[in-house]
Amino acid sequence: MSDRTFRFESVDNYIISDDLKLTANIAISMNKPLLVKGEPGTGKTALAEAIAEALDMPLIIWSIKSTTKAQDGLYNYDVVRRLYDSELGNEGVDDIKQYIKLGKIGEAFTSDEQCVLLIDEIDKADLEFPNDLLWELDRMEFYIPETDETIKAKHPPIVIITSNAEKELPDAFLRRCAFHYIEFPDTEMMRDIILAHYPDLESDLIEQVLDAFFYVRQYFDLKKKPGTSELLDWISALKLSGIPTDRLRQDLPLAGFLMKKDEDLAAVKKSGFGGLR
């Protein structure tokens, strides 16, 4: 690594594999966007948060929706407000800049300090969305024709892009990214994750929780398998409820914190988890 100060080690509440840590550091050193895939609950979004915290940088989050366009991340020109101001005779109508609002990429490029830019769930947008950002992410600049202005990154941001693998991304886009697939945590890593969030949790309860959690994931054909966030929420619920936890595999109390679909709850209940609440 060329710059020791840009080494991402880890933070207390985010457990990361050595492979992902190495990939993240290399992507940072090469100034390449890091594309992270994996099923929900594997810590993709939390990775960007952890990097920002570890490197003491601001975090800018661009959450992608099905209607999001690449232009939204760069800037928006409020032509309707300008027309309205013009009709009312308001001053400053000729100053187009006041009608330009930067998007999240624009904010990252104009930040006075280097930041972490998270483009979250890029696969929710249409197929052309990633390709529409190739130039901007490659060159770290974009052009605003309304003001004849080129916005160049003052400090190129660390770009983290997440995908739930709901659709394939274009090859041209993939070539420009470093890539890592986050495997779902195994029992040992999940135990470390639990301890990072609940360092005083009794070891017997941890083992019971892990046993029940992985049993549900492995032996039931669920529409939405519970992930890490659901597991941590379930533990919080169990601690707050006062429900005896010595028979988690048999009863699976408060299962609604683990499974969020009616058919999944019904399937597990039907199998013999008689104490579902």
Image (tube, rainbow, N blue to C red):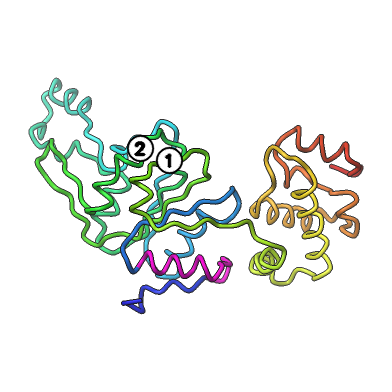
Q: Which mark is residue 32?
A: none
Q: Nearer the viewer, residue 221 or 103?
A: 221
Q: Total marks drawn?
A: 2
Q: Are marks 1 and 2 in contact (CB under 8 Å)?
A: yes
Give the class, few, some or many, for how many residues have Cα within 10 Å of label 1's Cα (few <14, many ≥20): some
Residue 20 shown in magenta: yes
Q: Hey, what amino acid is under mark 2?
A: Phe
Above-or-below relation of 260 to 19:
above
Give the class, few, some or many, for how many residues have Cα within 10 Å of label 2's Cα (few <14, many ≥20): some
Q: Give residue 152's quadrant in the image.
A: bottom left
Mark 1 and mark 2: span between their CA atoms? 10 Å
Of the 4 image quadrants, the one containing the C terminus is top right
* SS state under label 1: loop
* SS state under label 2: loop
Q: Give residue 238's quadrant in the image.
A: bottom right
Residue pointed to by mark 2: 129
Q: Which residues lie in the magenta part?
A: 11-28
Residue pointed to by mark 1: 64
Q: Give residue 183's quadrant in the image.
A: bottom right
